[in-house]
Image (cartoon, rainbow, N blue to C red):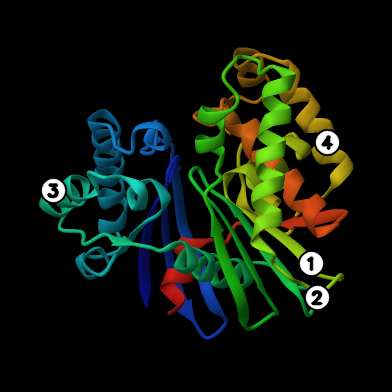
Amino acid sequence: MYKASIDIGTNSVLLLIAEQTEKGLQVLEEAQRLPRLGSMVDSNGLLAKESMYKVLVVLSEYVGIIQKYGDEVLTKTVVTATSAVRDAANKQEFLALVKETFGFQVLILSGEDEAKYTYLGAISQTKVESDSIMIVDIGGGSTELAVGNSTNLLRGISINMGCVRFNERFLLHNPPRQEEIRECRRSIEALLHATQLHFPSHTQIVAVSGTATSLAAIDQQLFHYKSSGINNYRLNTDKLATIIRLFSIHTFQYLLELHPEVMKGRVDVFLSGLLILEEVLRYTRAEEFVVSTGGIRHGILLV
């Protein structure tokens, strides 16, 4: 049975078409576009009309892809929205536009639901090597931390820090100033310690979302994104620190020339995502993490 899901995030809109089999969810087709729906939502609390219409263009493209698998798959497509839509005062305008244009009834996920579906999606696609795992999902507007084992989620939380939100809030220059980076780090550290999240010392860290997958692609010098080369890829804190230094001192234009496919639509917010990831690893005292291509769009099809 074919299934489709669309995840409307703060920076990205992701499509998944999969088949539910006895062995689990088998990915058939995926797509990613970066219309940045949540641009400036952190400062003004509103979805910009231009950003909303960019998302409609992406959804139109995705409808065409889904229709190849049959009208029933399109009719049953699950569409979710997260931090940007959740926070926006004019969310109903956006939801009405999507409903009127495509017939999709968008499900706005709470932060806790984001954590739950991210956890389910990640463990469905990625090898779990410990009886304690933490899924880290760095989105554009929020970051979800989900602690569990190979089968059960024990606790999931959402923190209002994301790569778009914190880029707009702290990293105001190109390249950012060192004091901006320090202030960003201090805010991330304070928010993490405020969670009082508890977990065993041997917890395996699994990172999902564009920050983690782009990092894996850059570390391998993959100029064409391939899920098979990204999923289950290991990175340690030393490599992460090296890439953070690179993105701290160079302009967006230079970094885009270095990694055009991976950084298009993401280059200006990538550093803030890396800083969040590094602070999470410090908080958990982890020396390495595993990258997963799973996420909300997978998890929502498993329930």
Does label 4 or label 3 sit earlier along the sequence? 3
Image marks 1 and 2: residues in contact by CB distance under 8 Å: yes
Q: Secondary structure at mark 2?
A: loop
What residue is shown with label 4?
A: 241
Name the amino acid type tagged 4: Ala
Relative to 66, say whether 216 is above or below: above
Image marks 1 and 4: residues in contact by CB distance under 8 Å: no
Separation (CA) of disc 1 from disc 2: 6 Å
Name the amino acid type tagged 2: Ser
Q: Nearer the viewer, residue 205 or 61?
A: 205
The N terminus lies in quadrant = bottom left
What residue is shown with label 2?
A: 130
What residue is shown with label 3?
A: 101
Separation (CA) of disc 2 from disc 3: 45 Å
Name the amino acid type tagged 3: Thr
Would residue 227 be found to the left or right of residue 90 on screen? right
Image coords of residue 301 (percent x, y): 42, 72
Tell me what residue is drawn at x 61 percent, y 74 percent: 155
Does label 2 or label 3 sit earlier along the sequence? 3
Q: Residues within 10 Å of mark 4 (few under 14, many from 20)?
A: some
Name the amino acid type tagged 1: Gln
Q: Secondary structure at mark 3?
A: helix
Image marks 3 and 1: residues in contact by CB distance under 8 Å: no
Relative to 127, say whether 235 is above or below: above
